[in-house]
Amino acid sequence: MSDYRKESFLALLEGKMTRKRGKHLEDASDKDLYYVISSIVKDEITPKWLKTQEKYQENKTKQVYYISMEFLIGRLLQSNLLNCGMLDICNEVLKDIGRNPEEIYKHEHDAALGNGGLGRLAACFLDSIASLKYAGQGSGIRYRYGLFEQRIIHGNQIELPDYWLKEEYPWETRKADEAIEVRFGGKINMHKKLNGDFEFSYEDQDKVMAVPYDVPVIGYQNEVVNTLRLWSAEVTEDESKLMSDPSSQYYHHLDHSHSIEQISGFLYPDDSSFEGKELRLKQQYFLVSATIQGILKNFKATHDISLAHLSEKVVIQINDTHPSLAVPELMRILMDDENFSWDEAWKVTASVIAYTNHTTLSEALEKWPTSMIQKLLPRIYMIINEINERFCKGIWFDHPDLRDKIPELAVIADDQIHMARLAIVGSFSVNGVARLHTEILKNKEMKYFYKLYPNRFNNKTNGITHRRWLLQVNPCLSETITEAIGPKWIQEPNKLIGLLRYSNDAPFLEKVGKVKKQNKETLAKLILNQTGIKVDESSIFDVQIKRLHEYKRQLLNIFHVIYLYNELKENPSLDITPRTFIFAAKAAPSYHLAKEVIKLIHHVAATVNYDKQINSKLKVIFLENYNVSLAEKIIPAADISEQISTASKEASGTGNMKMMMNGALTLGTLDGANIEIKDLVGDNNIFIFGLTSDQVHDYYQYGGYVAKDIYHTDDRVKRILDQLNSGEFGHQEIEFKDIFYNIMYHNDPYFVLKDFDPYIESHELVERSYRDKNTWQRMSVTNIAYSGKFSSDRTIKEYASEIWKL
Ligand code: 26V
């Protein structure tokens, strides 16, 4: 690092500290430093931000708009410093003046504007779009409250509100002059024009202002700065005036302004089951209407061609069905405001919108009651109706073979609007997020649509940004990699494959092993700090971190722990490799069974961790309030990555990719992207077990699985299930009847018992492999070497060339 650059960074720091915070550097708190460094970054990137946008305008660049109800961005300071090439300098200067960078970065509140994988994927995509110099924008909602904060009290999850905007958020810029009016409800008037067409006008609508807050998205050392635009719901200026005018009937109408602000009030914390809540529908339309209006305004300001050519300059990717009202909204504006005929408007709409599916779980599929849409969005309802009628007629006349499938295909059926069907019909591309998932869409869940539109379906296997998830979170591993193969992998993550040459190089393996050990020590400190429990740093760190869902089967994991505990109790001198099981997971607030599993993990932990007899061999850790920042600390320290969903249920998974990239070995089912990991690293560098997706499918379709039979024939299983009922874990009075009942009397819907035995066997193989340090390190390095494929840069290049045509 040149002294000159360090000196000038220090000078900036000192200057800004006095100007912005009125303090000398020596007196600055960590928080002062956080704000001042953020401001330095913002100063650095603002000219680039303007320039990037001007260039797009000047060159009339085609733009992709990524619309998502969720962007799980986490903290930004460190990754922004990294991307603008200032991270090393900043760290060094801070250390020079006796400060700890970590302590400073910690002051940023996570932006938790998402639930899990789908929201984090959106954040990784933005990073890759900018880093690959594509012209792209994210569009989302600026929720005042992000995903709840989780506290655990006596094993029970308690949810606290996440008021992340309590203090200034340094990355956002409010753009009041670019606010857009969004309208709900009202009366629709129809007039017949001279040419026989109908014309529509609206009356008595409720108006809401969508005010954009722009967050910069900085490309990796490439001068590009894109935008994430987050919309906030506010009262319109007119109404605001009326409400502060004592002579007006609206004076102090606080209820009204409250109900409007509620639209961007909070993120819905349930990603497991669809609930037709009106406020959620309002959020969706609010996001979509503001975004589409903004897109068209920008198009008109930039291009002098007709909106009929929109698809040459704009593509809209919708993240799951949540923004699928984009279809009727674009139709509405083109027809009612721009005088397009139906056919003209349809041609534009269906060539601009592309849809990504992220789940096949039927509980999560969005279906809105027609009555709700009709009341809240009467004109949108009319348009959806027309889309449905034309679509059904089309099948009737052009695809007689599918006539009897119309009830399964219709956009409106049983007084419900099926959003996935709307999204498929109204888009030019439908993609799944891993190979198996896309095959399931094509051949099972959406097979008749696939028959109708075979060219529309395509796969885009997910990815993660290696800049955050390797370079930033695991600097020592990154350095070790660079020492071996040079720095080119940072720009081209596929170059990580060069590590294969070192997979038998003892000194290199040793270095990688050392880094893992350090990372485990760091995590052990965090665990001690947060839980008071001291874990064995040489034990296997076996990690399952993700939302709590039945299909993700945290239950199977904890059953294995109970099994090990039972074995050790029976034979305390059993020679097993010490293990630390690490869990972190939030359950949706209304998901009872998921909360029971959290409680069970805690009670097993309480029993195991304090049992003197086996103490040194087993530890169970649950880290509360799982979020992006916590993931960043756990992932570099993982030895085993648990990816044990019931086959066919996990569309892709992305935690699997993050852990692989940090040298953990996957213990998983043939589900989601695990399959693609296995195909790359080979059977010897991964631990695969359990039912296949086809077997699971066949059991659902034809029956033949009886969970009770396993209970009655496998003593290990019977013992565990009986322990749930006996109150053995935790306090005597705590029982886990609902979990027991679900397995025994709902026939174990996620095949926990069926996969139990192969899971145990797989764990035994893990244990044996770990004993041979050299083999383990080789496997670990092989995983890192192949992980380049899972950089979201690869994913985004595929989207850009095959869907977006940028
Ligand atoms: C679903 C719902 C359902 C009802 C209302 C609110 C709400 C909010 C979010 C969701 C998301 C469910 C879909 C989802 O998160 N899928 C995950 O997407 C990841 C990225 O593609 C993928 O890696 C995971 O396997 C998949 O479960």
Image (cartoon, grey):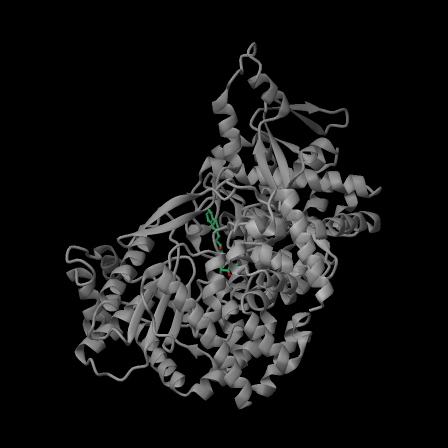
Quarter the N terminus occupies: bottom right
204 over 1 or under it: above or below: above
Residue at 55% over, 40% down: 284
The quarter of the image holding the C terminus is bottom right
Residue 696 % position (x, y): 39, 67
Q: Position of residue 464 (x, y in %)?
A: 57, 64
- The quadrant holding residue 192 is top right
Point out residue 161 in the picture as x, y percentages from the top left corner: 42, 42
Q: Let me know if residue 731 appears in the view.
A: yes
The reply, left or right, for residue 511 in relation to residue 701 is right
- Residue 240 vertical position relative to residue 23 in the rendered view, above or below: above
Residue 27 x, y percent position in the rendering: 55, 49
Q: Nearer the viewer, residue 449 or 135?
A: 135
**Residue farthest to the top?**
247
Residue at image location 52% in from the left, 85% down from the top: 509
Q: Residue at x 58, y 54 (%)?
A: 76
Residue 645 shows in this picture = no
Which quadrant of the structure image shows residue 331? top right
Q: Nearer the viewer, residue 613 or 796?
A: 613
Q: How many marks?
A: 0
Residue 299 position (above or below residue 575)? above
Q: Is residue 447 above or below residue 790?
A: above
Horizontal side, residue 606 vs residue 478: left or right? left
Residue 229 picture quarter: top right
Left or right of 341: which side holds 768? Answer: left
Front residue of 627/557: it is 627
Looking at the image, residue 171 sits to the left or right of residue 512; the answer is right
